[in-house]
Amino acid sequence: MSLLELDDVSVTYRIAAGEVPAVRGVSLTLDSGAALGVAGESGSGKSTLAMALLRLLPKDARVGGRILLDGDDVLTMRWGRMRAVRWAEASIVFQGAQHGLNPVRKIGDQIAEPLLVHGLAKPDAARRRVTELLEQVGLPAWRARSYPHELSGGQRQRVMIAMALACSPRLIIADEPTTALDVMVQAQVLSLIKELVAEHGISLIMISHDLSVLADVCDQLAVMYAGRVVEHGPSREVFHDAKHPYSKALAAAFPTVGDPASRMAPKGLGGDPPDPMHLPGGCSFHPRCPVALDECATLDVALWPAAPGRTAACVHARANEEVS
Amino acid sequence: MTSVAMARRRLALSRFWADFRRQRAGVVGLVILIVAVVLALVAPLFIDESVTSVVTGTGPKWAAPSLDYPFGTDESGRSILLMVWWGSRTSLLIGFLAALLSIVIGMVVGITAGHFRGWIGASLMRVTDWFLVLPSLVTAMVLAAILGGSTFTIIMAIGVTTWPTTARLIRAQTLAVEARPYIERSKALGGGHWHITTRHVVPNVAPLLLASTTLEVASAIVTESTLAFLGVSSNKTSWGTMLRGSYDWGAPTQGAWWYILIPGLAILAVVMAFMLAGRALEAVLNPQLRRAS
Amino acid sequence: MTAPLDALEPAAQAAGSAEEPQARRGTLRYALSKAAGALFSIAMVIVGTFFLFRLLPGDPVRNLAQGRNMTPAQLDLERHRLGLDKPLIDQFFDFVGDTLRLDLGTSYEYKRPVLDLIGERLGPTLLLAGTGLVIAVSLGLWQGTHAGWRHGSRFDRFSTGASLVLWSVPTFWLGLLLMMVLGVGIGPIPGLFPFRGIESIDAPDGFAYVLDVASHMVLPTLTLVAVVYAQYLLVMRSSLLEEVSQDYVTVARAKGLRDDDVRKRHAVPNALLPTVTLVFMRIGFVVGGAVTVETIFTWPGLGQLFYEAVSVPDFTLMQGTFLLITVAVIVMNTLADVVYHMIDPRVRSA
């Protein structure tokens, strides 16, 4: 049985100017112990989707569909149950290099906090667990007494990972865990995540704009554009032989670390991501698509089988299948 | 060239107005402001200084509001309505001029401190911080007491004690503007200090100055009334001196609520109006400033 | 198990063991530099006061004597008494020397040493301003926190609106209104609290005296609090708003903390530090409020003494109280700065 099942999930922000659809009908499944990568540009809805999994979105966001975690619908859970699920069953690794850690509290206290909140350990045991966790991520035990600003970006990211492991969750959601780190540190952090997830049999959802990183860590890959999954399949296949022109462009882009411009607009892809309030008609990618046909402006293609075990939302993808 | 710049400016102005109109509280503030200023300007067409004279006060003393005296009378039988109207001229004049003085000092110091880094900037900031720490009301009282009370001294006293916040704001903005690439280009092309500050820095800090002037006028009006209430005033009838009179003549114990309420409400209305307009300006201008940077 | 990838680990550990004393030394150095800055500011105040009272346009004695009938001979006598007939440089050194010896001169009005007068008035001011500050800070921070946490809510809109009104209201006018409504009473409603002075004329002894003073404190304190607390509320609200959108707050929620705990354990400690500093940085504002409030309610404190000095006018008394108030504000500011540095881990080792 799958650990996580998303069934037609949609997220709409209601702001003064109207409704902004951020996620539009996403269905995905994640098996126990598996790793799923979600790729896309900023504004593709990937982070919104991640936040929706634990109902962490602001109040002005409307979430539709079903999010089944171990068969329980997260969206209809009572608050008490929701809080119990948070971190104990699914935890999140944020961009710790930025502001994911509380600047005025010691690292050890922040790692121990979920253990104490969920009543999983007494203070003494929690302290021992913190030492253990810090060792697991390659940090010395005395770091527990440090404040976040005393650590480097890579060290903070390790702390974020140690924190996510604290309650031995079954699922970890990693939202851009390597953004804003330099290349060497990125590689270290990635291999750390890979190793720990494999070692503890934890399922992983990793979110990134960088297809190569996801292909390296995850088994399955979903590419999102304008709030929808446009391609889904085994990660190596999607990375090396993308069926959707957008995935192709993402795969061809090697974002330069530290250069935000390359993150926003992958190489070989002109134009900006669409304004979610005024999505283009037909296939929402067609204005930027290098191989768009006339019909793309009116025909909104749903995900359909593109190859064995793979789906894509592109007219060309079906054409390929018919040919093969 | 100039006509293009003009057209662009006109476009920016109309967009700004469209944005401002969406701030409902700001529009309300602006309307109250315009009404208050117009009333103060046209006052001499209807009344004159004599409404504040003790001798010509003809009404009954301590009269409660009635048809003859809509806002009642004071201890000498003067009409509160007419005095508030006439007094608005002094209050608004001092408020505007003191704010202007404060903003001009703040702008000059702020731009200089931001433009000339190194020891000039550092020592200017030192002086600014020193002024910032001084308790401004107390300092203004001493200044006004020593210089003697006149409209000019009150304006000086308020202006000289309130500029440091503006100076800090403008310095930060100057630093931000001068960090932009085109300033570098302008320097490379031989733009001198005067050229860079007047052509590039001033136009960029101007919107911010407008918002902060508006808020500054509000606080200057409050300060003026407080100084007048505390006995250091310009000797002309203002809302502050009226309230001083009400206190001296024991209006609270006389139960003459109108004598206290009306001048105070006048202050409150005008100050709130400036505050609302200023905050709306900030709300409209800030995203634009951010977008421009 | 992953081997520690921290290449710098041994060195870092060594640095870590020496971390505590290092931080303390940093704080001490910071405190010393701040104290030096404060001393410089105080020196500037002393010099500034000297010139302010002597070099400004117009003859200080004539200005200060306005409204009183004085013969030229009397004016000369007054000048001599104040040492204004000596060369300026001599006056300056006399003044600095006297001030450093805490000799603030003799009051013209009271014919007594200024320092003694200040000593008498210090207690009531500390009582009033201290009580007012404690109430204003706790109330303002509490309400600001809740308004910022639920921003856009009815509570928030009410709080922000009320603060803006209170901020626009001149302190003295609010005092007058409170005096009229709660002190004198309006129509059939009798006055509830005394509004003149610090104690009744026939003040009782013992505990009853404490109650008497407390009831005299109600109106002045209320006025002071109302005006000052609005500022604290707005500052706390906006600094909490900045924290609410930070990632670490989302992390805290994701950890399964209750909403109240996210606020109390994570958002508030971060918002509190800059707010409290700002609160004490603006202590001068409270001083201005105290002068006004003491004047209205004839509270026998420093503020009222200063007001008397200005309205008499009493040259030496004004100078002495001005110096004292200003120096006190500078010292408080410096203390706030140093304490902030000590308690905020972010700036402590930065």
Image (tube, coloured by chain):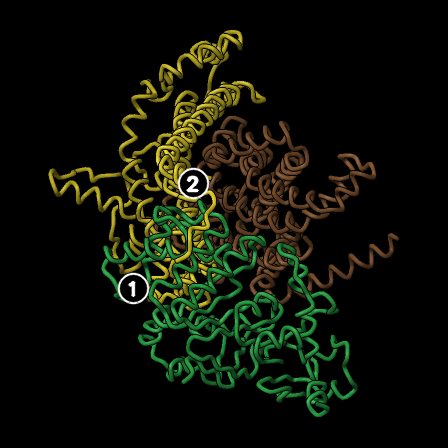
> Contact (CB < 8 A) between labels 1 and 2?
no
Q: Residue at x 76, y 81 (%)?
A: A292
Q: Residue at x 42, y 68 (%)?
A: C154
Estimate the x, y position of residue B87 in percent, counting from the top left. 55, 47
Residue B158 tag number? none
Asked whether residue C157 appears in the rendered view, the answer is no
Which chain can be seen in yellow? C
Q: Which of the chains bears the disc numbered 1?
A: A
Q: Quadrant of residue C292?
A: top left
**Which chain is rendered brown in the image?**
B
The image shows residue A57 at horizontal and vertical percentages of 47, 71
Check disc 2 and report the residue beneath it. C12
Which quadrant of the view contains residue A12? Answer: bottom right
The 10 Å Cα crowd at callout 2, few under 14, some 14 to 19, many 20 or more, is some
Q: How many marks?
A: 2
Tell me which amino acid carries mark 1: Val
Can residue C101 be seen in this snapshot? Answer: yes
Residue at 49% x, 48% y is A152
Mark 1 closeness class: few <14, some 14–19, many ≥20 residues within 10 Å: some
Q: Is residue A4 left or right of residue A116?
A: right
Colour in which chain A is drawn:
green
Identify residue for label 1.
A117
The residue type indicated by label 2 comes to: Ala
Please provide percent x and percent y for residue C180. Answer: 34, 51
- Does residue C232 lie above or below B287 as drawn? above
Farthest residue to the bottom: give it: A322
Horizontal side of residue C198 vs B123, given as left or right:
left
Which chain is mark 2 on?
C
CA gap, disc 1 to disc 2? 31 Å
Foreground pick, A191 / B261 = A191
Q: Secondary structure at mark 2?
A: helix
